[in-house]
Image: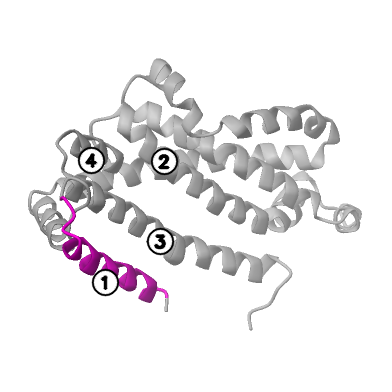
Amino acid sequence: MFVAPLLALVAVWAVVVPLFDVNPRIFPSVASVANAALDTIRDGSLFRHIGASLLRVGLGTVIGVVTAVPLGIAMGVSPAISSFLTPLFRFFSVLAGIAWIPIATLWFGYGFGAIVFVIFNAVFFVVAYNTLLGVSTIPMTIRNAAASLGAGRWVMLTEVLLPGALPNIVTGVRTGLGFAWRGLIAAEMIATNVGLGYMLFVARDFYRTEVIVLGMIVIGLLWLLIDRLLLVPLERATIERWGLVRRT
């Protein structure tokens, strides 16, 4: 059922383009895109672009999560920190991701650092805010009960706060990674010479619409695979383990 709509879309595409004799410069046929895929697989360029994009989005996401979770927990346990930083988070959350591309290229140059920084911004604010929400939903009675049983700061963090906030954290990672993926493609069109976004940008200059559509398909399929095979199972398992639902 998940694949059927995608196959239906390809079937419509295969019928409509030749039926209306669409100019290949406007939109390519299924066969030309398939040939472009074979060519890029043979010369290895497709795998180079995919590898570069996945490395950047993976590193930027890891840095964003590692820095956002402690800050989100600190905001969740300290009203003073939360009240001070919340306006800043609301301000910068609007700018997170693509809006940072121009200044990122000035700071880090055109290349790996600028793109990772853009991805970091796309992930950081979403994960930190979701961590704050997760900690805030933990009832004070549970925190007080743990403290009365002798839980120190480390035990409170690892056995109460972090597990309690984990469902929200995973949801934040899933949402932030979606923003990061879009920011990655936009940044690669400007700030690098390898990656899926760069592949689209170069193909446009040579009117190679078959490569553009191929890149769009690869980008969409990669995100579907990441979301369906990694993020959705992780979110479901986390909610079932530490959330308020049970496996049916």
Is the residue 184 above or below the residue 40 in the image?
above
Mark 2 / mark 3, whichever is N-terminal: 2
Residue in front for this viewpoint, 127 or 1: 1
Query: What SS does tag 2 mark?
Result: helix
- Which quadrant does the N terminus fall into? bottom left
Is the residue 19 above or below the residue 99 in the image?
below
- Which quadrant does the C terminus fall into? bottom right
Measure how far apart labels 4 and 2 are at the Cα level: 21 Å
Q: Residue at x 37, y 33 (%)?
A: 187
Residue receiving disc 3: 224
Kind of residue sitting beneath label 2: Leu
Kind of residue sitting beneath label 1: Ala
Residue in front for this viewpoint, 155 or 127: 127
* Magenta residue span: 2-23
Mark 4 / mark 3, whichever is N-terminal: 4
Q: Residue furthest bottom?
A: 248
Mark 3 / mark 1, whichever is N-terminal: 1
Would residue 10 be counted in the magenta stretch? yes
Kind of residue sitting beneath label 4: Met
Kind of residue sitting beneath label 3: Leu
How crowded is the residue under tag 3: few (<14 C-alpha within 10 Å), some, or many (20+)?
Answer: few
Foreground mark, 2 or 1, reads 1
Measure how far apart labels 2 and 1 are at the Cα level: 37 Å
Residue receiving disc 1: 11
Residue receiving disc 2: 59
Residue receiving disc 4: 199
Mostly what secondary structure, the magenta segment? helix
